Amino acid sequence: MPLRIIQYGVGPIGSAIVRVLLERTGATIIGAIDIAADKVGRDLGEVVGASPLGVLVSDRADEVLARKADVVVHSTSSYFEQVFDQLLACVRAGAHVVSTCEELAYPFRKYPELARRLDEEAKAAGVAVLGTGVNPGFVMDKLVLTLATVCQRIERVFVRRVVDASQRRLPLQRKIGAGMTVEEFREAVEAGRIRHVGLPESVALIADGLGLEVETISETIEPILAEADVRTEYLHVRAGQVAGVRQIGRGLAGDQERIRLDLQMYVGAKEPMDEIRFFGTPDLCARIPGGTHGDLATAAVVVNSIPLLVQAPPGLRTVVDLPVRFAATF
């Protein structure tokens, strides 16, 4: 019996998720929610660039959730506080929820009370809730914890992810400040408009997953400047303008650094890659040349987690609670 699925949020990531779901015989999409005027009332298949599905996008979340889905795939915002009521409505409708909300990947340190409330509501409803994606959700946390299996002892963790944002969607290129002046970039950082959301959550997930003592988590955000003109499908970034962002998350025990996550996302990156290093017994270095494609991988991670999530114990879960698996048969 195929799982009945509602797609909540039909932006670039939500649309990518729908296209992957359409390839899975174990899923049937029974509803779609979005507030964008140019999507409401249209066939979901047409919105995502596929054949018509006979499912219309609606801005009435309560009516769509009343259709009693097994799973809601949620992709509306990066911020837990902003989506809390949406998640609560899904849970109270009796649906498992897998969300791309970055802060939901590990909300227990930053939002302990909201996390507790959502966990209690999910347990009462008998459903599981998960925040996941490529990052947070895999490259800079779940993959780290998986590779750590071969270590006897770990003293320090270093992860570096270099992303060529030229190949990514326009909202991401704008989110990293591509094309800005340095002054505009710093003003945007101060206003909270420029940052990758989820790096502190990945630090916390690694620390708790590995049992590393981390008392404080810090984060810095700096611009990466274009050394030459760069053209993407959407933007023309001139030499000297901001090409993107370098964001570093650190987990500290006193003044000792236990975890460092170095994320560089910029247009024109010449050597994109993912790298994970452990300092301990034994030392270990793993590298993925070319890196992991963020948008494609996010959709894959979300869809592959669905058959695992519906079997998970009720409550607010993290990627640590689920095995790693490619759900080809789902």
Image (tube, rainbow, N blue to C red):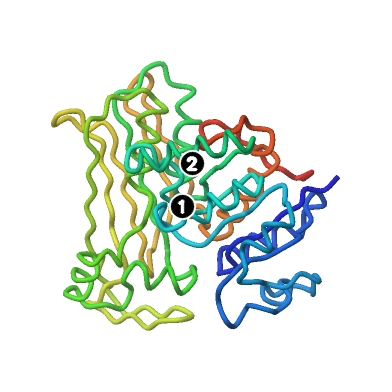
Quadrant (top left/top right/bottom left/bottom right) for the C terminus:
top right
Q: Which residue is mark 2?
A: 118
Q: Any mark on residue 3, and which?
A: none
Residue extending furthest toward the top? 152
User: Disc 2 or 1, which lies upstream in sequence?
Assistant: 1
Question: Residue 321: horizontal and vertical position, in percent?
Answer: 55, 31
Amino acid at the residue labelled 2:
Leu
User: In the rendered view, does 65 fall on the left or right side of 154?
Assistant: right
Quarter of the image for residue 264 reads: bottom left
Q: Residue at x 38, y 69 (%)?
A: 268
User: In the rendered view, does 217 fall on the left or right side of 59?
Assistant: left
Question: Residue 174: horizontal and vertical position, in percent?
Answer: 37, 73
Q: Any mark on residue 84, and which?
A: 1
Quarter of the image for residue 299 reads: bottom right
Q: Nearer the viewer, residue 188 or 221?
A: 188
Q: Residue at x 76, y 60 (%)?
A: 30
Q: Nearer the viewer, residue 172 or 197?
A: 197
Label 2 element class: helix
